[in-house]
Image: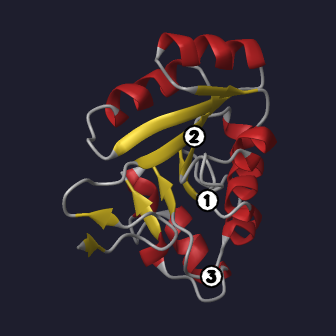
Amino acid sequence: MSTSAAPGLPAQSASAPTPIRFGMIGAGFIARWFVEAAREIPDAEIIAVTSAHPERAAAFAAEHAIPAAFASLEEMLAARDADGDPLVDVVYVGSPNLLHPEHTLAALEAGRHVLVEKPFAPTPAQARAWWRPPGATIGCSWRGGCLPSSPASRCCATTCPGWDRSGVRCW
């Protein structure tokens, strides 16, 4: 017996849940907070990390018992598990703010779900570029940014064709 999961995420068995495998971008102090929080979730597993500085990714992986460290985001997105499936299900974007658009788009284009630190989209043009049809989920760890009254939410509602808040999650 399985339970339903978000599109693109593994279905969960009633007997043994399949963990959601996270790949992280960034190895700084906010990434440490994410590791601490994710370790509190039984169905979350941090499986990989990448950083602009490969040596920092390797050190972070060793310090936090993360199985894989990658020299680039492209390598992490291309990595496969033993069954040939993508190594990560969800990409956590904890890179410097100016890189959020580039990293978020790369992960979405690779078919991954995304959890991005604030800012979700620094400009209306970037919010439009991130818009995807149903199937991919984008999460933002800035609760106020997803309230219907927030400038970011109003911007998406007025500038993204077919905007549907149901594909965006905020924490």
The tag earlier along the polypeptide, 3 or 2, is: 2
**Which quadrant is home to the N terminus?**
bottom left
Does dot 1 land on a helix, a strand or a loop?
loop
Please tell me whether mark 2 sits on a helix, a strand or a loop: strand
Which colouring convention does the figure follow?
A: secondary structure
Q: CA distance from mark 3 to mark 2?
A: 23 Å
Q: Are marks 3 and 2 in contact (CB under 8 Å)?
A: no
Mark 2 vs 1: CB contact within 8 A: yes
Q: What residue is shown with label 2?
A: 23
- Residue at the image position 37 percent from the left and 49 percent from the top: 19
Residue that sits furthest to the left in the current view: 15
Task: Answer yes or no: is residue 108 visible.
Answer: yes
Q: Position of residue 27 (x, y in %)?
A: 60, 22
114 is higher (above) or lower (below) than 62 = below
Q: Is residue 3 above or below residue 116?
A: below
| Name of the residue lying farthest toward the front | 83
Instruction: Give the amino acid at mark 2.
Output: Gly
* Residue 129 badge: none
User: For the residue marked with disc 3, what is the amino acid?
Assistant: Pro
In this rendering, which labeled residue sits more in front, label 3 or label 2? 2
Residue 96 shown left or right of residue 93 in the figure: right
**Residue depicted at x 60% and y 54%:** 83
- Quarter location, residue 51: top right
Point out which mark residue 133 bears: 3
Q: Is residue 39 left or right of residue 84?
A: left
- Per the image, the residue denoted by label 1 is 112
| Total numbered labels | 3
Residue 130 higher or lower than 132, as above or below:
above
Q: CA distance from mark 3 to mark 1?
A: 13 Å
**Eye-nearest disc, 3 or 1:** 1
* Place of residue 101 in the rendered image (x, y in percent of width and height, measured from the top left): 73, 51
